[in-house]
Amino acid sequence: MDIIFSSILNMFQPIILIAMVCGVSWGIFVGALPGFGAAIGIALLIPFTYGIDPAIALPILAAVYTGAYYGGGITSIMIGVPGNSPAAATIMDGFPMTQKGKSQKALTTSLLASTFGGIFGGLSLLLLAPQLVQVTLLFGPAEYFVLAVFGLTIIASLSGASIIKGLISGIFGLLLSTIGIDVITGANRFTFGEIYLFDGIPTIPLILGIFAFPRCLLMIRDIFLKESLTLSLSDDKGSGESATLKEMFKMWKTLIRSSIIGTIIGIIPGAGANIACWVGYGEARRNSKHPEKFGTGIPEGVAAAEAANNSVAGGSMIPLLTLGIPGNAASAVMLGALMIHGLVPGLKLFTTYASITYTYMVAMVFSCFILLVVGWYASRFFAKLAMVNFIILAPTIIIVTLMGSFSNRQYVFDMWVTLLLGIFCYWLTLLKYPMPPILLGVILGPISEKGLRRALMISQGDWTIFFTRPICIILLVLSAISVYYGLKISKNNIGKGIQKKEKLKL
């Protein structure tokens, strides 16, 4: 209890407070830009936190995480385009409210629901994570291998309409993870004599090359094709009355229900906010006395979606901090950030580095209160930033991206890694290959390889070690369920795509 109290006091240090305000503001901004979101927002900020005390750096990233989830709903409400996929369900009632001249009420309803969901998820993280960490004591090499396999099954649910393309992306990530010195034999693999690759592909240039640089190239492509020069075409100024606490209190059942749904789904690797927002919205509609009003522009629909997707942020951190399994792309980037700062998920986070870890978890809750203040006064301003011309936005982000690649190790080689990997991932993006599986493959590849080889060394080559240990059996069953669940989602996405094509033909 003392460590939680001291972590709360840390939040009121001026430098941390100012840094978190900046982090929330940046998170709202990147969240409001369609196609960006929390993963890219955190990736772009990681280089600037390198070398900073983790007790300051991690709260900044927590603030970005929180702000980005809310920011995605701004463009959903203002222009009917989700800033990120978790905000897709917000369009159902958010944009119709704007069309009715109630955009300010929609924005503030979204803000209050996001704050509630974020606090709920953050408190769940604070209370549940320390208890679940004891499970890691039961993990040996065999368990870590099967755990990594379980993590890799997330690829199925991140693959969109084509699971084949998702698997290809994941395999590409696994191949990238083999670059560097073999930790078992000490042999160089695929380094081509470059000393810069002895430790593998550097994390920051890799993340920026996968997420940030391709997005900038897509902007440049739109400039030359003259398809669109801005992310927003809306002139709505967010007029109307704001939501009141009394109105929000009337929706308390919806807020609590969606927050519970979001937290539980966040804990399940691979599910994430993309699913939580729709489940929360669907359950709110199913339990409503007037379900026919959903989709016509009512605050309850906005609150249901936003509370669900924002509570995922805290829930997704539970498997990340305890087992090192990211629940979504943003938490995968956070995993990279933790490792950059020398923090490896597991028992040590709650013992050796307990002070830093609890500061981070408290920051997940505290950042929601900062979000409430910043978002209340700045929502409409951030929405207008979505109308910044690509001619200004694209080169600015390219410069920040290359500077971020260089600042980590101060090697020009790292800038080339970002540039070449970014160009390659740009073409993959055009061909509809998903990017998150690449990062998952890079992160989970070494864990699975080391676990497999060490387990086989211990068992003297006996493969039954993976099928006789209780935790391994449980994880293998969960892996099978995850694959089935991912295939089902992929099948549904394909079905929706076919239906859309048929409608267009008609």
Image: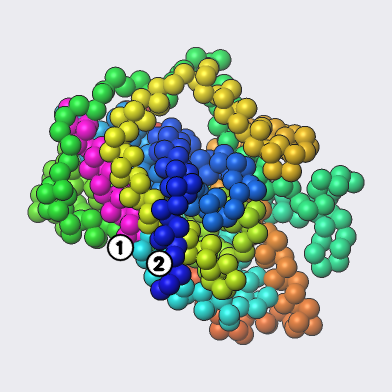
Q: How is the image coloured?
A: rainbow
* Amino acid identity at mark 2: Phe
1 vs 2, front mark: 2
* Identity of the residue furthest to the front in this view: 14
Q: Secondary structure at mark 1?
A: helix
- Residue at 35% over, 46% down: 370
Q: Is residue 311 visible?
A: no
As drawn, 477 above or below 417: below
Magenta stretch: helix, strand or loop mostly: helix
As drawn, 393 above or below 371: above
Residue at numbered disc 2: 5
- Residue 493, position as x, y percentages in the image: 42, 46
Q: Where is the N terminus found, in terms of image quarters?
A: bottom left
Nearer-the-camera pick, 128 or 277: 128
Q: Is residue 237 left or right of residue 349?
A: left
Q: Is residue 390 visible?
A: yes
Q: Earlier in the sequence, mark 1 or mark 2?
A: 2
**Within the image, what quadrant is residue 400 found in?**
top right
- Residue at 55% over, 50% down: 57
Which residues make up the magenta segment?
A: 101-121
Residue at numbered disc 1: 260
- Residue at 24% over, 60% down: 256
Q: Secondary structure at mark 2?
A: helix
Mark 1 in CB contact with mark 2 (< 8 angstroms): no
- Residue 435, position as x, y percentages in the image: 57, 44
